[in-house]
Image (cartoon, rainbow, N blue to C red):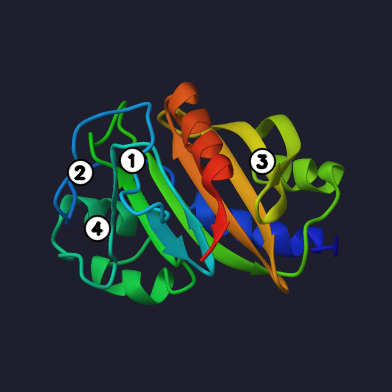
Amino acid sequence: MGSLGGTRLVALLAVALLLLGGCTGDGDEPPRPDASGSPVPSPTGTPELTVLGLGFDLPTGWRTFDVERADSASETARAVAEQLGMSPRQLPERLATTELYLVWKGGAEDGFLPSIDVYPGPGGVPADEEIEQDFVRVGAEVSDVSRQDTTVGEVVVVTYTLPTRDTTIEGATVVVPHGDRIVIIAVSEVDRARADDVADTVVASLVEA
C-alpha cells in the first residue's frame, strides 16, 4: 500500500475530532425506526448507504444530518457550530470535505451526540505504527489497530478512547483504500459496544458502489 504522511493523517483526524465535543440536540430529518444491534435490511440486496464509490450498511438507529439542508437554528446545528467556533450558517463551508454525516437518533447521551463522519483523504494507508502515533498525537488512547479483508480489499480498523472536557469518547475508525485515495469512516460514541457494532457492520457489508 502507499504511504500517507503522518502530518496529513493527523490533519484529517483533527478535523474529525473537532466535531466530537459537547454535541447535543435533535435532528433535522425524520428519525429512523427504533432498534439497535442489528443491520438495517437491504430490500434489494443493495447497500443502505452509498458514498465516495463505496456502499455499506449500518446498525439501525442512525440518521443523516444534511448540513446543506439543515435548519441553522436547530439544536444540532448550533452544537456542532459552537464546537467549531463559528456560526451555524458557516457550517456548510467548514464541513465541505465531509461527504456524509450521521447522528444517533436517540440524541445526546452524557452530553455527547454520537456521530459517524465519512470523508475522503489523499494517498494510501500508512503502517500500523504510524496510524497509532497519529491518533496519539490528537490525544487518543488506541486499543487496537487491525487489518481486515473485505470485498473491496484490506481495510484498517482503529479502536480508541478520547477523553474530552465532559466525557470519554469511544471511537472506531475504518480506513478504506479506494483508488488513489482513502475513505475514512469515523464513529464517535459514548458506548463501546455500539461503536464496535457500527465498525463490524460497515466492514462486513462494504461493497463497490
Q: Could you tell me if the residues under marks 3 and 2 are in contact, i.e. CB atoms within 8 Å?
A: no
Q: Which amino acid does label 2 sit on?
A: Arg
Cα separation between marks 4 and 2:
19 Å
The residue labelled by disc 2 is: 32
- According to the picture, the residue beneath numbered tag 4 turns out to be 77
First reached walking from the N terminus: tag 2 or tag 1: 2
Residue under the image location 69 percent in, 70 percent down: 181
Helix, strand or loop status at disc 3: strand
Looking at the image, do the residues carrying marks 2 and 1 touch, with CB atoms under 8 Å apart?
A: yes
Foreground: 116 or 52? 52
* Residue contact between numbered discs 4 and 3, judged by CB atoms under 8 Å: no
The local secondary structure at tag 4 comes to helix
Q: Which of marks 4 and 2 is in front?
A: 2
Residue annotated with mark 3: 157
**Disc 4 versus disc 3: distance between alpha carbons?**
29 Å
The tag earlier along the polypeptide, 1 or 4, is 1
- Give the answer, above or below, for where 146 lies relative to 117: above
Label 2: how many residues lie within 10 Å, few (<14), some (14-19) or many (20+)? some
Q: How crowded is mark 1: few (under 14 residues within 10 Å), some or many (20 or more)?
A: some
Camera-near label (2 vs 1) is 1
